[in-house]
Each structure stands twice: as C-alpha cells, then as structure tokens.
Amino acid sequence: MELLLQFLSNTGFYLADYRHFVMLAVGSLFVYLAIAKKYEPLLLLPIGFGVLIGNIPFFKGFGLGIYEPNSVLHYLYFGVTSGLYPSIVFLGLGAMTDFSSLLARPKLMLLGAAAQTGIWVTLLSAMALGFMPKEAASIAIIGGADGPTSIFLTAKLAPHLIGPIAIAAYSYMALIPIIQPPIMRLLTTRKERLIHMPEPRDVSKKELMVFPVVGLFLCCFLAPASIPLLGPFFFGNIMKESGVVDRLANTARTSVIDTATIFLGLTVGASTQGDVFLTTKSVSIFLLGAVAFSIATASGIVFAKIMNLFMKEKINPLLGAAGVSAVPGSAREVHLVGLKEDPTNFLLMHAMACNSSGVIGSAICAGILWSFMM
Amino acid sequence: MSIDAHILKPLDFFVDFKQHELESFAAALKSRTVDAGEVIIERGTPALTFFIILSGTYEAAFKGDRSIILEQIGEVMGWSTVVHPFHYTGTVTAKKDGEVLEISSRDFFELIQGNNALGEKIMKKIDKIASERRTIAAGSQ
C-alpha cells in the first residue's frame, strides 16, 4: 500500500496544479491551430508541443526539467541560452535573402532604420513601468519583429524572460496581417497610398557579391556585439550570391535553418513552465510587445512621410511599415494594402528592400543594447 | 518530385520568364498526379498551395452554384495562396485524371525573399488572374 501511495505521489496527476493545466491548454491550442487550422504550423507546432513537454508535472531534482542542470532538455536549451540557434537561423536567412531591391534603392534602408524607433521607445516605457534595464531592453527588442533576434538578446540580458518574450515576438510576427494594415491606413492618406514607385534599376552580380562583405564591415564595426547574428547572416548571403558554393547555400537555407527552427521552437516552448511563465510580468511583456511592434510600424511610415517633405521623387509611405524585420510578412502586407487602393501599384519589391534592411537594423539594435547593458 | 525548367517554358504563365527565373521557380515546384473525383482545393479552407495545370480537367465551383472548367495547360488554381483573402474562394475537383505542379505558400514567399524581381513578376501575373476569377466568383451573387 505504501509503495502504491509513493508511486501515486510521483505521478504527474498528483504533482499538477492549476498552472500546469493552464499551460497545457495553451500548448494544446497552439498544436490545434497548427494542425487543424494550418496557422503558422512551422512555428506553432514546435512551440506548442514544447509547451506541452515543458508543463508535464514532474518531481524536482531528478534532472527532468528544462531548468534543471544535466537534463536532456537543459542541454537542448543551451542552444537558446548561448545564442547558438538564433545565429544558425541567421545563417539560413542570409542564404535565402536577395538584397537586389535594397541595393537598387539604398535610401529605402533609412526606413528599416526608422522602424527601429519602436525598440527605443519601448525600452524607455518598460523602464518607466519598473522593469530593470536589462529586462526592458529584452522586451523592447520585440519591436524589431524578429523572433531569433529577440531570443538572442533576451538570452544574453534576461534569460528568465525568454519564454514570454519569445512567445510574444512570434505571436506579433504571426499577427502582422491583423496589426499592421489598420496602422498603415490610419497614418496615410489615400493619395499617399496611391504613390507609384519607379522601377528599380538592375543590380549587377558584382554588387550583390560585394554587399555582404561591405555590409559585414559597416554593421559590425558600428556594433561589434551584433557579430553573432550578422556574421553568419552575411556569410550565408555571400554563399548565395557568389554562386560557387550552391550546395552549401542550399543546405543553409533548408536543412540547417529547419534543424535550428525545430530545436529553437521546441525548447522555447518547453521553457514556458507554468511557475515561471504565468506571472503578471508576462502580461506586461505581451502588452509592451504590442506597443513596440505598433510603434515600429508607425515610425517607419511617419519617417517616410518626413522624407517626402524633402524629396522631389516621393516614396509611398506604406513602405515604412515594412521596415520591421518580419520577412517577408510585412512586405507582403504593404504590397496588399497598396494593391487594395490601386490594383496596378506593385510595392512588393520596394517593400522587400525595407524589410531586409529591417533585419539588419534590428540585429544592430540588439548588438548595441547588449553592449550597453552588460 | 522536383521538376525541370523546360517543362515550364511552353506554358503561357511563364512566357516572358528568363531561363534563370524558370530554373528558380522550377526548383520550388513539385509535380503531383491527381485522380478523377479528387478535391484538390476546398472553399473556405486556408489557401496554402498554388497549382499549375499540366494535364487533366478541373471544375472550380464558387458560391452560388457558379463554376468554371479549367483544362488549359498552364492555367493556375489557388491564387489566394499569395494574395488576399488567403483562403480558397472556390472548390476545385478533378473531372479527369491529371497532373499539376504545386508550390506551398511558404516556398512561394521564400522564393520572393530570395529573388525579389522574380517574386514581383509572379505576383503581377497572379494578381491579374485573381481579378478575373474574382469577377467570375462575384457574378454568382
């Protein structure tokens, strides 16, 4: 009888409290949305299943939980806390990104920079709300709308917040079609939305090959702490553009990035243990994340309007919304909002320029924040 | 199964594509055989795959019992994979055995990310088709 009671007291049923059930319901919802609704399955399935794994009740000290040293999950989680997975994801992103539209019209790079305003405004807001500076910086980077960058910076500055920040960052990336279009319409007039952009010039192969090297120097001399993200990113890009290692470039943009995404999603999901995730801090992080992302979208648009005050050849201000680094989701939304006003106005290629500069911009911001806060 | 670029060259949709563009697009496409009676697109479900007809006859049925027959080689189905509303607006059923080329929305947007100019070219073509199909679908209401 005693053995039976001991066995029962070691089961998950006995150890569970309401937080486990709340998180198991959240994980199940993610898995359901991924499979039944096919909603962002590449993100939601690994994260959702990770949430389920991380929230099965277990007795502490047996080396099972993600936060317990020597557990298998802890070793896998090392890829998150060390910044390894985000670096690998950036390698793959570099190998799949085309910078031709950015090089054809370099002034659009400014919109990618302007959209990072959301990060700095949120940093100040989070600090005003009582978050410690390192926590505030980790929350603010959500405004970059880049999951791997958010995870990278949070792992360095506030690892205890990785779960909520990662979930918030990926949620807002998935919610781009809902969040961005109303802001775009609110901040632009119909006349502005109808502005056509001139056809971009052809960019030579040589320019595309030189860019990763020049970009690496410029960005990493400015913010050396962004090397772990931008180093692999530009390396991936030169593999793509040089054309001499097609096999490696192809592996980087398929198998390599997919492998990193699997373990990143699974372990980030598992890191959302109810006792560390279900806090008022998490709610604040979600709210501030929404503010950061909205301000980022708005600042890109407003900056484009300011540029138009001084430029002879006007820019469609919708492009500013693509300055966040959610590639290619925000570029696609800009394109679709433009098309809605005028079915002959194709903004996609121009929006991709802002979008890819947003990726670089948010990685630089992460580097600057990391070096400032250490 | 991946496909060769030469399969795309004679298709209307790709008439103004350069060889390297055809190769990039072909690398992202997969071919699939379809059996008569098979429903390959269901109205109202999330649009996750875009199709190009290689052979066979397909009926696209829209709301209000309006339908069109698609049997021309190179005709496309599932345009809302890449433009609003991102869910299928009609149900497509194969009337005869056939073969289609397919590309998922994820692969399509990765293609745009990797080759902006090609992405825009394809988007323009799809948008034109979408306008025509929307007119057909709206005709039923």
Image: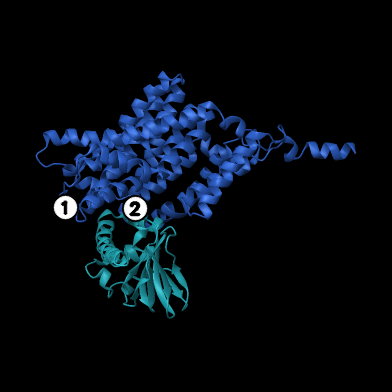
Q: Residue at x 30, y 50 (%)?
A: A98
The reply, left or right, for residue A247 in relation to residue A269 is left
Q: Out of B55 and A368, give the one closest to the viewer.
A: B55
Q: Which chain did the renderer colour cyan?
A: B
* Residue type indicated by callout 2: Lys
The amino acid marked with disc number 1 is Glu
What is the C-alpha distance between the residues marked 1 and 2? 24 Å
Q: Place residue B71 in its image quadrant.
A: bottom left
Residue that protrudes farthest toward the bottom in the picture? B96
> On screen, A366 above or below A134?
below
Quadrant location of residue A106? top left
Q: Which mark is residue A240?
A: 2
Q: In which quarter of the image is the C terminus of chain A?
A: top left
Residue A199 numbered tag:
1
In this view, the residue in front, A79 or A8, is: A8
In the image, taking residue A26 as reference, residue A207 lies left or right, namely left
Tell me how many marks there are. Answer: 2
| SS of the residue under disc 2 | helix
Q: Which colour scheme is used?
A: by chain
Residue A215 lies, with reference to residue A340, above or below; the image says above
Q: Residue furthest left?
A: A312
> Residue A362's x, y, as percent?
35, 35
- Could you tell me residue B47's position as x and y percent? 41, 59
On the image, the x and y values in percent for residue B3 come to: 39, 70
Looking at the image, which residue is at 24% across and 66% down?
B17
Percent x, y for residue A65? 65, 36
Instruction: Kindly identify which numbered label has been placed on residue B60.
Output: none
